[in-house]
Structure formats: structure tokens, C-alpha cells
Image (cartoon, rainbow, N blue to C red):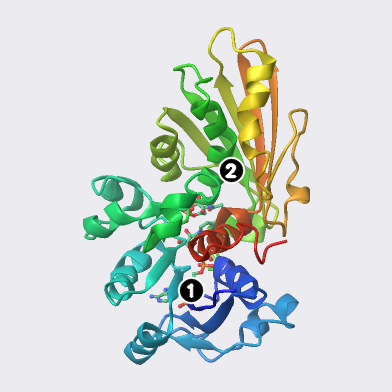
Amino acid sequence: MPSQSVAIIGASGYVGAELSRLVQQHSALSLLGCYVSEHSSDAGTLLSDLYPQYGHCLKISLQGLSDKEKLSIKRQADTVFLCTDHGVSVALAPEFLEAGLKVIDLSGGFRLDAVEDYPTFYGFEHKQARWLQQAAYGLAEWYPHEIATAQLVAVPGCYPTASLMALLPLKQSGLLNNNKVIINAVSGVTGAGRKASLVTHGAELSLQAYGLFGHRHTPEIAQQLQHDVLFTPHLAQFPRGILATVYADLNPGVSDKELDNAYQCYAEQPLVRCDKRARPAIKDVVQQPFVDIGWHRQGNQLIVLSAIDNLLKGAASQAIQCINLQLGLPIEEGLL
Ligand SMILES: NC(=O)C1=CN([C@@H]2O[C@H](COP(=O)(O)OP(=O)(O)OC[C@H]3O[C@@H](n4cnc5c(N)ncnc54)[C@H](OP(=O)(O)O)[C@@H]3O)[C@@H](O)[C@H]2O)C=CC1
Ligand SMILES: CC(=O)N[C@@H](CCC(=O)OP(=O)(O)O)C(=O)O
């Protein structure tokens, strides 16, 4: 089996910790180091002290990302995973790419095609148009060849993963009519990251929509689907998981058989669980690398339901799927 040395930057965050665990249990990956920002208060702390549930596998000391550490990563790592905020990823990725390393970025820093969309949806000017153009979109079941050969992979957002896995079979099969697709999705609170904020404060949490009309995942979903979407995220009071409820209109005359056939594209995919009558539940995907999909129709109106763990299929386990594709390994290696 091929062996890759990997570095994880942003390892103390919710996504970084899950990814560190998955790398540790993957027989083709060796973990060079787990990094936080240079002056982080967590530098020197054991990752297992932050996440005692992973005490058996994450007794790894977090290191501040100093110039010295960056140099050592450039010398010794094959792949760098960035589990950092969008702006941090955009600043860090070119350094490692230009040193010849592969970068798998879990932020939104390299997901949108148009550099002009970054000020609007991310609030910063994107100065890395060349790398943006070269990034493969890391939706593993849909772009395996692009991911396999890319030096830079932009792992999709959690909401886009749930939404696109539900919708792309319909789009690919030409079953969607031209009406806007509506997506209502509910996320657990780990979706907002580990840093404390009033929005994620326990006493403030209930169930509430946010990001109306302007959430950054709207252009990401529309770009990949090549279809207009109205996406509304909701934050709820549970720790992890996303349920997307997708409303779409089918073209006139689409039969049940054509609809079911569209989802046959996942028949050989080990991490996609499809059942046309299912109403997927978050409890069944939490701590799992799967996406669960169910679909229901009344005439030409279709409702597709899609559930994932935001930290796994929505981030860390999808990143592992991407590196598996790059190493020529089965897509589910180290995940089941
Ligand atoms: N949470 C989720 O469900 C999902 C998140 N994502 C994306 O993944 C990324 C990480 O998310 P999440 O884990 O939730 O975020 P967290 O806020 O939980 O973690 C962020 C991590 O980045 C580190 N960090 C911050 N600044 C720097 C820096 N300059 N250099 C190196 N490390 C730094 C933090 O440590 P410290 O501050 O101590 O340095 C921490 O380890 C984000 O881009 C997010 O949008 C994608 C899909 C799903
Ligand atoms: C609940 C919550 O706050 N969720 C985050 C999305 C998390 C995520 O997936 O971020 P990226 O995909 O963009 O990296 C949000 O809406 O900003």
C-alpha cells in the first residue's frame, strides 16, 4: 500500500480533530504533525486533552505553525490538510503548493470559480486566481478523476455536500425542470466551529434560520448544479449532523422508473445509502461517513431528503475520500 506523510493545520478545531483521528487509523497515511496558529493558546497541548473521547489515538502535541514548522512540513510532508478558516487557507495554501506539496483544503477558500464572488460571499478579495482555477472540487463520488490528479483539492462545504448529493443525480439525468430548486437545511452547532460565540451559546440556541438569500453556500451549490437554487440554512440545538430537505420540480412526463434510475448512479458507491421511501435521520449518520438519501414524489413535485454528519461526509471523511482517490485506493479506505 502507498504511504503518504501528511500534516494537519487547524487540528484543534472540530474538523481538524476528526481528520486527525481518521488519519491516525488509516494504514496508508502517517501523521507528520498537528498544527495550530503560531501563538495559539493550545500550542503544546495534547490533542487528546481537548478531545478526551479520542484519548486512545490522539496523544499528539499540537504545534504552533512557525516558519520553522512550515519549513519542516515542506521538507517532510506529501500532503497538507488545511482545516482553517477560509482566509487563513487562502494565505497558507500557495506556500505549500509552490513547494510542490499537495493541499487538501477543507475551507471555502478555493471552492468558487469566480474570484469576483469572494468579496460578496466571503468578505475578502481573493488574490490567488491561478490556484482557484486549478482547484478540483472535492465532491468525491462526482469528480474522482479531477480529484485524483489535482495538486489542490477544495473539499465542499457541509451544506453543499448534502444538497448536491441529493440533486446531482436528477440534474445529470435531465429530470429537473427550469424552476428554482429550494433547499432548507438544518445543521447542528458544530457546523459553526469550536470558537465560542453568542450565536452558539447554549442558552441562545433553539431552531432558527440564518443567512437568508446570501449564504456563501448558495453560489457554491448553484455553480456545481448549474441550476438556480434558493438555499436557507438553519441552526439547531444538537451537536452534529445536517438534514437537507430539497424541493424540486420534475419535467413533465418523468416516470417513477426514470426517477429511481437516476439514483442508480450511486448503486456501487459504498458511502452512499439510497432508499426511495426513506426519511433519513441525523441520528443514523452521526459519527458515520455516509450520506443517506430518500426521495418522495407527488405528481411532478419532488422532495429529496439528505442527511450527513457535517464533520465527516461534510468535511473530514470526505477529505479522506479525496486522498484515497489520489492514492489509487478504494474510496472508503480507512472509513468503514
Ligand atoms: N464545522 C463544520 O461543520 C465544517 C467546517 N468546514 C470548514 O473547515 C474549516 C475548519 O472548521 P472548524 O473545524 O469548524 O473550525 P474551528 O474554528 O473549530 O477550528 C479552526 C482551527 O484553525 C486553527 N487556526 C486558526 N487560525 C490559524 C492560523 N493562522 N494558522 C493555523 N491554524 C489556525 C484553530 O486553532 P487556533 O485558533 O488555536 O490557532 C483551530 O485549530 C473552516 O474553513 C470551516 O468553514 C467545512 C465543512 C464543515
Ligand atoms: C451551523 C453553521 O454555522 N454552519 C456554517 C457552515 C459550516 C461549513 O461547512 O463551512 P464551510 O462549508 O463554508 O467551510 C455556516 O453556516 O457558516
Alpha-carbon span between mark 1 and mark 2: 23 Å
Q: Which is nearer the N-term, disc 1 or disc 2?
A: 1
Q: Is residue 326 left or right of residue 204?
A: left
Q: Is mark 1 within 8 Å of ligand 1?
A: yes
Query: What is the quadrant of the N terminus in the image?
Result: bottom right
Q: Mark 1: which amino acid?
A: Gly
Residue 111 vertical position relative to residue 54 in the rendered view, above or below: above
Residue 205 vertical position relative to residue 23 in the rendered view, above or below: above
Identify which residue is drawn at 30% across, 55% down: 134
Q: Position of residue 21 (x, y in %)?
A: 64, 74
Residue 220 vertical position relative to residue 77 in the rendered view, above or below: above
Residue 147 appearing in the image:
yes
Q: Is residue 94 left or right of residue 266?
A: left
Q: Which residue is mark 1?
A: 10
Q: Position of residue 156 (x, y in %)?
A: 48, 51
Q: Residue furthest top?
A: 253
Q: Is residue 24 left or right of residue 319?
A: right
Q: Nearer the viewer, mark 1 or mark 2?
A: 2
Q: Which residue is mark 2?
A: 162
Q: Position of residue 73 (x, y in %)?
A: 40, 84
Q: Mark 2: which amino acid?
A: Ala
Identify which residue is drawn at 70% across, 53% down: 238
Q: Residue furthest front?
A: 1
Q: What element does badge 1 sit on?
A: loop
Front residue of 93/108: it is 93
Q: Position of residue 108 (x, y in %)?
A: 41, 55
Front residue of 322/110: it is 322
Quarter of the view holding residue 281: top right
Residue 198 appearing in the image:
no
Identify which residue is drawn at 64% across, 39% down: 266
